Image: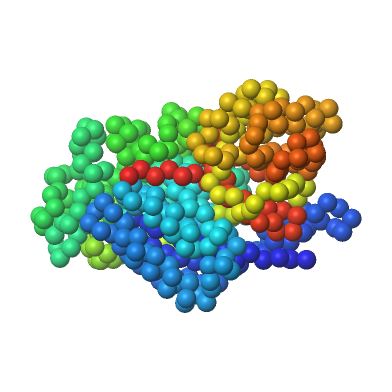
Amino acid sequence: MAESLLSVGIDVGTTTTQLVVSRITVENRASGFCVPEMDITNREILYESEVAFTPLVGENLVDGGKIAEFVEEEYRKAGIKPTEVDTGAVIVTGETSRKENAAAVLQSLAGLAGEFVVATAGPDLESILAAKGAGAVAYSQRTGKNVLHMDIGGGTSNLCYIRDGEIAATGCLNVGGRLVKVEDGRISYVSTVVESLWAAGASPRPTGRMEVGEGAEVRKLEALADVLVQGLEMAAGLREKTPLWDALWTQECGEYGERIATPVCGLARNDVDFRQGRMEVGDRWVVSFSGGVADCIREDFDSFAFGDMGPILGRAIRKSRLCRGEYMLGEHTIRATVIGAGCHSAQLSGSTVFCRDVALPLKNLTVAAVPEDEQTDAGSIARRLAAADSGKAVLALPGYAGAGYAQVAQLADAVLEGFGDREILVCIEQDLAKALGQMLFLRSGKPCLCIDRVRLPAGSYLDVGVPVGPCFPVVVKTLILNG
């Protein structure tokens, strides 16, 4: 029997703020004689808000009051109440995530939107949500082609390489259409990113510096757009990296791998070397675009139609090496990230799980990941839990395929000793949660949640919702905000 979840996505971006409401259908795909195999079988968008400009107070603060009014009004138009919402995400993206009060606005919006609407930020997750919301992941799954997806917004370009339908790498460059704003024919704002191009000695440099108050010259902005596009070409391996790359790379994404000679998305995430995701000459791969600037790739607008350099940047991309081969615009462009947040942020745990005396939902659980070779070491488990930066942490245990009773018992002993007096919260990748959870509870009598079939990268956070059938809806996320 199918069950449904009402999901909300809210994206507070550099340029625009949007909201979508969707229905997620969950069904058991196993026969009545088998262990339930729950899966998300359909995502239906029920309501899309207007696309509103993100309200700011000066250049350093988000106007949280106006955004709250926007959310309340759109809920009213959609005919829903926060108490009816089962899941979803509020995501603060691009330059807005760097505003001084971004964290406070993010958390207050999550509380306003519903009990299990999670607050999340961070370029890696933005890249994944945008790629899913634009349809790039589904396209790769359907066609077998590898896709380099670029979600180009107001302040940043979120990059996601999809290989054989799976996310292979993510990254982010400070390239966007709102790095320079224009009002009444004059420059009203210049991002510090633009200034950094000179400070870092990036070459080639845009022609002529721009100052707030001076007349907006299309020639100068075209020169700047050409330089920004070179950064995108470097990301696709279509141009050798120069100091420009370092000036544009978003440091929240960590380091990147070395570029190799053949065309490759030269991105990496933390310790991931993207050379494993190389795109050899002759491979079937395509560049995909979404974000507000994507519409300016497809259509010619007046240079300052939106009060920024977005149309100029869009034209530069259309003329670049990125569009000389196979490329496409996503099924959704400006709405890609918000649709990703509303339709694709939640996933399901396995169905053989265990929960006793744990109050749900759980939010912002710090992930304490333990390597497989240390998982029976109680001291290692205790140290990693202690290093978690919150009162509650979830223990992430990869591996343990085909473990027998003795191995599970040994693991349970180490977990119990490592948790000490803490509430026991465990996530294991293999289909082992019910057996492990029962053993943990019977031996300790303490509140215990044990879920499986969820991969938790180190440095991530986990939210767990109330059960849907035998499964739990979960959101794996990052919470990176720089004020």
Looking at the image, is 235 positioned above or below residue 1?
Answer: above
Visible residue check, residue 116:
yes
The quarter holding residue 424 reads top right
Instruction: For the N terminus, give its image quadrant.
Output: bottom right
How did the renderer colour the structure?
rainbow
In the image, what residue occupies the spot 74% across and 59% down? 469
The outermost residue toward the left is 214
Q: Nearer the viewer, residue 71 or 142?
A: 71
Visible residue check, residue 474:
no
Residue 185: x and y in percent read: 14, 63
Q: Nearer the viewer, residue 168 or 440?
A: 440
Q: Nearer the viewer, residue 81 or 204?
A: 81
Left or right: 169, with 178 as reference point: right
Instruction: For the C terminus, give its image quadrant.
Output: top left
Residue 67: x and y in percent read: 37, 64
Left or right: 192, with 64 as reference point: left
In the image, what residue occupies the spot 47% across and 76% down? 76
In the image, what residue occupies the spot 34% across and 64% down? 65
The quarter holding residue 295 reads bottom left
In the image, what residue occupies the spot 80% across and 54% down? 36
Residue 181: x and y in percent read: 22, 57
The outermost residue toward the right is 33
Task: Tell me how many marks there are.
Answer: 0
The quarter holding residue 393 reads top right
Residue 349: x and y in percent read: 69, 49
Looking at the image, is 172 positioned above or below residue 75?
Answer: above
Q: Nearer the viewer, residue 325 or 215?
A: 215
